[in-house]
Image (cartoon, coloured by chain):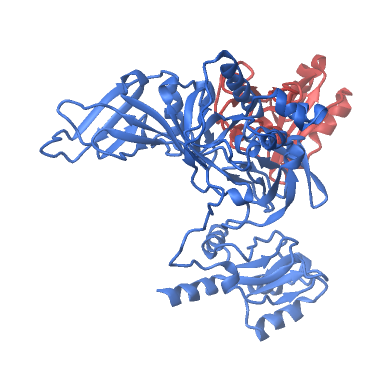
Amino acid sequence: MGRILIRFNEEQVSEPIASQVIIEYKVPMAILSAHINSKGGEILVEIPDDAEDTIVEALRKRGVTVSVPKSIEVDSEKCFSCGSCVALCPVEAIRLTSDSSVEFDKEKCLGSTCSICVDACPARAIKAVKPNGNGSPNSREKKS
Amino acid sequence: MKKLVESSGVEVAFKEVDVVTTGTFGAMCSSGAVINLGHSDPPIKIDHAWINDVEVCHPGAAVDIFIGATNMSEKQPFEYGGGHVISDLVAGKEVEFRATAYGTDCYPRTQVKTTLTKDDLNQFCLLNFRNGYQRYNCAVNSSDETIYTYMSKLLPRFRNATFSGAGELNPLMNDPDYETMGLGTRIFLGGGQGYIIGEGTQHSPKNQNGTLMVKGDAKQMTPEFLQGAAFTKYGTSLYVGLGVPIPILNIGLAKKTAIRDSEIFTDIVDYSVPRRDRPKLGQVSYKELKSGSIIINGKKVRVSSLSSLKMAKKVAQTLKSWIEEGTFTLTSPVERLSTTSVFRPMRQTEEIPFVVSVMHPAVTCTEDEEIRAIAERIVTKSVNHIVVVDATGKLRGIVTSWDITRAMAEGKKALADIESRNVITAKPDEPLEIASKRMAQHNISALPVIDIERKVLGIITTEDVAKLLGRRY
């Protein structure tokens, strides 16, 4: 399964764009997070890998911005397992193991669309990173 | 020890165990380091000094400086500070030092700039005024906005909670009458050996809030157990690994060191109230805190630790191995920690005003009332704001005289069409200055004052603030 971030502007937000694409291509999309109001917004969706190219193209044709969200990376050298991030995570992608180490599940993580943990890390060990590996610390303001 | 007491009883544990090692690893803001740099040529009597752009103060004569963990870099404030400088020096990194001075006949130099590592320093002494808090608050936020505190990021409306402290592993919790601790007790400090040099500042033994003042040679310490930290919108700090060995001198200590997390309680404190005495919402045990969630007002709230339990265990285990190897010997204190000290609030000669001191009763209406009736009330009561409440007096919205005028102009009849539902509010025990700033920030002229259940207690307006300032100046 791949994840894509779909952004709508003020005009597009009232159109049923995502629904049209789902119906037309008969591809299931799981909405993982949504920050939307009448001014526009973005949704993070999960789609099957083999349909990714088709869906991205179909969405772009309808004028919305489609991108791959940045992923969250934890620098295990810097992390001293305080656990500040654990209770903040909305999808329980971070947990404490039985020996009190912080364990991060990249699969569950919503990536840069959430970033709630980034500015709560006292060790500054959590960063939003572009999928191609370019680090970009403090790249986004927190969203809560 | 804890398991042994549970399985075999105190008597057996007392005979079997000689020493219990404890440990904690948390953000300890009242930490710092005293450094002696040696003299430059020509000599300088430092007036102002910086290391890696973090201002350091000069507590003594010419070339003694003190690095405070919470002092922040002038170039990267909130991200890099004194705690990081200490950690970098301990790690053997090179730091940039610069200083200015006014120049005297005996110390003519007025500025100096150099790079330094810990090997260049005469003394590099970790000196922490307040470490190892016996227990600490559990922090929550009842307000509508995320707040950033020294207890980290607190999400609105109790969406998370944070706590600090090692609970049953904490040094002071295992010897609550301080029988074995005091001036001269040798301890694990920052990966090296250090000493307790007395009670910490704000030591408050009567309510289980004891603290330690400690020192140690930082040149012997390791960066793993001394780590700089940054708390967003609060500032910088230093995570300190601290462990105290407790010799089991009597059966009482065997019993005391068997303490469990389930027996250690702390207060749940609402950090959204910016006051010295913040509201307490109940008590919770360290067992519940470490479980990952607690119950507040009947709701499950996820809770995170700020201090590292993993590192606390490592401190206690390392100390244990040192004692077993014979590289660490226990000392008895020359003077035990006080069990009677009291932590008093600041004496203030000037009080600041709070919302409660200027608020007055709000003129209210309910949603089923007609606009005309509300317009009349605005005139008869001569106010500009009408607070919309429900049958139980809880806040629903606000209507201003401007909203009514606009309704007339646009021919709107229903209150629902003109009232503002997203109301910016104040709390009675907030400082007036904070509430005033909120009015300015949102460009509004009144704030309904509500309690924790959103019941309307009154209203404050910009006129109230102006009147108060008029009286004061």
- Quarter of the image with the N terminus of chain B is top right
Residue B103 image position (x, y, % from top left):
15, 38
Q: Is residue A134 above or below residue B230?
A: above
Residue B13 on image: x %, y %: 74, 27
Q: Residue furthest left?
A: B105
Q: Position of residue B69 (x, y in %)?
A: 45, 36
Q: Residue at x 24, y 36 (%)?
A: B46
Quadrant of residue B178 within the rendered picture: top right
User: Is B323 or B334 nearer to us in this picture?
Assistant: B334
- The hue used for chain B is blue
In x, y percent, where is residue B17? 68, 24
Residue A21, quarter of the rendered image: top right
Residue at image x 67%, y 80%? Answer: B378
Q: Is residue A100 left or right of residue B151?
A: right
**Looking at the picture, does residue A126 appear above or below residue B143?**
above
Question: Furthest-bottom residue in view?
Answer: B380
Depth order, front residue of B102/B261: B261
Q: Nearer the viewer, residue B150 or B406?
A: B150
Looking at the rendering, in which quadrant would you find the C terminus of chain B? bottom left
Q: Is the residue B113 above or below the residue B363 in the image?
A: above
Front-most of B142 and B385? B142
What color does chain A have in the rendering?
red
Q: How many marks?
A: 0
| Residue B361 visible to an observer of this rendering | yes
- Give left or right: position of B375 versus A123: right
Q: Is residue A92 visible?
A: no
